[in-house]
Amino acid sequence: MTARHLWRVLLVGAVLLGAPRAGIADDQASSLAAWQRLLPVLEHPRCLNCHQANVPLQGDERRIHLPRVERGPDGMGDSAMRCTACHSQAANNPSSGAPGAEGWSLAPETMVWQGLSSGDLCRLMKDKARNGNRTPEQIVEHVDKAPLVRWGWAPGGSRSTPPLGHAEFVQQMKLWAAGGAACPQ
Amino acid sequence: MLTLNVNGTDHQLDVDPEMPLLWAIRDRLDLTGTKFGCGRALCGACTVHIDGDAARSCSIMAGDAVGKKIVTIEAVSGKVADAVRSAWQQLDVVQCGYCQSGQIMSAINLLSDNNKPSDAEIDASMEGNICRCGTYVRIRAAIHEAAKTLA
């Protein structure tokens, strides 16, 4: 081969070697993009208020729960201040204004989201040791069907709803999972 | 029509399932020892026991209480209840009395779970019961006193 053609060969070779294999990088990119879209939902008060270490938060203003309650031995409060003392396990209470849904309680201790970066929250979300032993597909199932999750979109009172509709949120979760549950740094 | 088991007896009540349990207790069953204070689960005057746990009856829907054991201040019994009553009398805890049904029901729940609570545990458990007369110091002392007899 003459020098005249060598640089063309080298150029094409460099391009081919440097190009990502089609499919996997696309999957990863679309998974990451889906994560960026669903993150604001996870950080919205309707979700984050109960994904707390010891004390739930209340309202769009995220104030400390009043009266003060704590996680207790099982995530449902302690003694005379159990969650069920005031919160229905079926529905919002129209007289007292106390919200309610099946399973009303703090999220488990391994699912504390407060203070996590986007990357750390993403890694927690797909860590089976911390996420209730769920595959990404099972996480999709959970956010699609779990009554307490769905409550976030029908919270009653003057509570705002997350920035994506529930169906859209589930769709983004599916995209995230399908692309390999990619996480930012 | 729903059936509520209150103080050991079943009662058939023609009430909306969303009616606050407090109303059913006071207006339909004439059990007026349980008080209305705020209606928003913020004061604890309405505290009863449901299956042994303290509950704010203003924030319990009657329909949710079906099939459960509801006990009010009029009928709460047992050695913890006796110890609490005795301590409350001995230390003259009560001032106007309005909050005290709720205070007593919460204290009984606390001492049934933990018969030697620390001050911090008393704070945490009694947090939901407010007293406008400021008898908190006597409430705390009476809980400690009741704990002594339960030791």
Image (cartoon, rainbow, N blue to C red):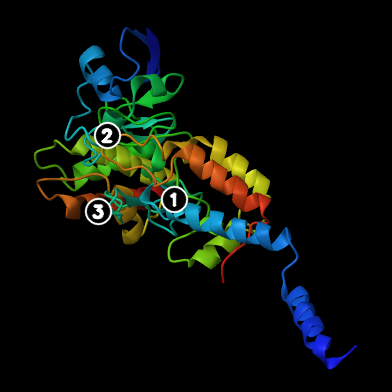
Write down the quadrant of residue A31 in the picture.
bottom right
Q: Quadrant of the N terminus of chain B?
A: top left
- Front: mark 2 or 1: 1
Residue at position x 46%, y 53% in the image: A42
Q: Is residue B138 left or right of residue A156?
A: left
* Foreground of the two, B121 or A116: A116
For label 2, the SS is loop
Tell me the crowding category of disc 3: few under 14, some 14 to 19, or many 20 or more residues within 10 angstroms, Cα based: some
For label 3, the residue is B140
Residue at position x 43%, y 29% in the image: A90
Disc 2 to disc 1, C-alpha distance: 24 Å
For label 2, the residue is A97
The percent coordinates of residue B91 (x first, y second) are 18, 48
- Front: mark 2 or 3: 2
Nearest to N terminus: mark 2 or mark 1: 1
Amino acid type, callout 1: Val
For label 1, the residue is A41
Amino acid type, callout 3: Arg
- The answer to whether residue B122 shows anywhere in this view is yes
Residue at position x 47%, y 37% in the image: A150
Against A145, residue B150 (above or below) is below
Q: Can marks 2 and 1 be said to lie on one chain?
A: yes
Amino acid type, callout 2: Gly
For label 1, the SS is helix
For label 3, the SS is helix
Disc 2 to disc 3, C-alpha distance: 30 Å
Q: Chain of mark 2?
A: A
Against A90, residue A2 (above or below) is below
